[in-house]
Amino acid sequence: MIKITYISEAVTAAIKRNITIDDTKAEQIEYGIYMAVSEVIKLSILIIISLFLGIFQYVILATVIFGTHRSFIGGVHAKTHIGCFLMHSGIMLGAVYASLLVEIDKFILLPPSFLFCMIIIYIYAPADILNKPVVSKKQRKRLRTGGFIFMSLVFAAALIVPQVYARVLIFVSVAECITMLPMVYRITGNEYGGKEVN
């Protein structure tokens, strides 16, 4: 089995042979390639699983919404790629199966879920980590505002889409907000970044 590090190192070495870059930039490129390849592998496996289980459309929706939420409001990260895959897949499949099995009307779920998510965003967003901190108050404000807007759009969409799709939107949004809580950070061994300088 080819290790992801072999791919990222080989591609970075090829770039360095053709473009003059310093070691810091090379490390950034290598890390970016490493993360991109690992994400492709993780998503490919999840897609195959979802196709096999017949829940592809729901998993794709959950993955897009969850990923967009995280780009704004953050949350915990697993320490290993296997841990990341298991955590991500667990949240996606859990949200989808909960949406299929828990037949609670979306109009009952929407008010408390929306209130919970807005409170968590207000208190904790963006929930960064030590090795990927939010480095400025301006960036923190921009991410938090984006998080509020996107979360509001997701819940607005949940008002008009069919019940199962609405529950996917609701459950994956709530799950994302749970990943921002201090208790979850402690359980997973994460620490908030909190190093903004201006």
Image (cartoon, rainbow, N blue to C red):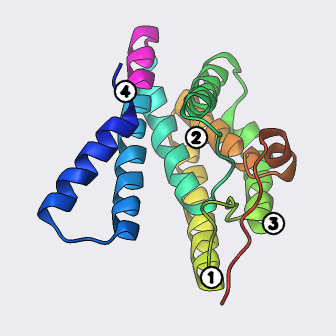
Task: Provide the residue designation for mark 2.
Answer: 169
Task: Provide the residue designation for mark 1.
Answer: 136
Give the Cα separation between the discs numbered 2 and 1. 30 Å
* Residue 112 location (% of width, % of height): 80, 47
Please state which amino acid type lies under the numbered disc 2: Leu
Q: Residue furthest bottom?
A: 198
Lower sequence index among marks 4 and 1:
4
* Residue 168 location (% of width, % of height): 58, 33
Task: Provide the residue designation for mark 4.
Answer: 44
Lower sequence index among marks 4 and 3:
4
Say which residue appears at 77% left-offset and 56% top-offset. 191
Nearer to us in this view, 145 or 140: 140
Residue 123, label in figure: 3
Say which residue appears at 46% left-offset and 36% top-offset. 61
Camera-nearest label, 4 or 3: 4
Say which residue appears at 85% left-offset and 46% top-offset. 186
Q: Alpha-carbon neighbours of circle 2 within 10 Å: few (<14), some, or many (≥20)?
A: many
Q: Which residues are magenta?
A: 44-54
Give the Cα separation between the discs numbered 2 and 3. 21 Å
Whether residue 189 is situated above or below residue 101 in the rendered picture: below
Lower sequence index among marks 4 and 2:
4
Please state which amino acid type lies under the numbered disc 3: Ile
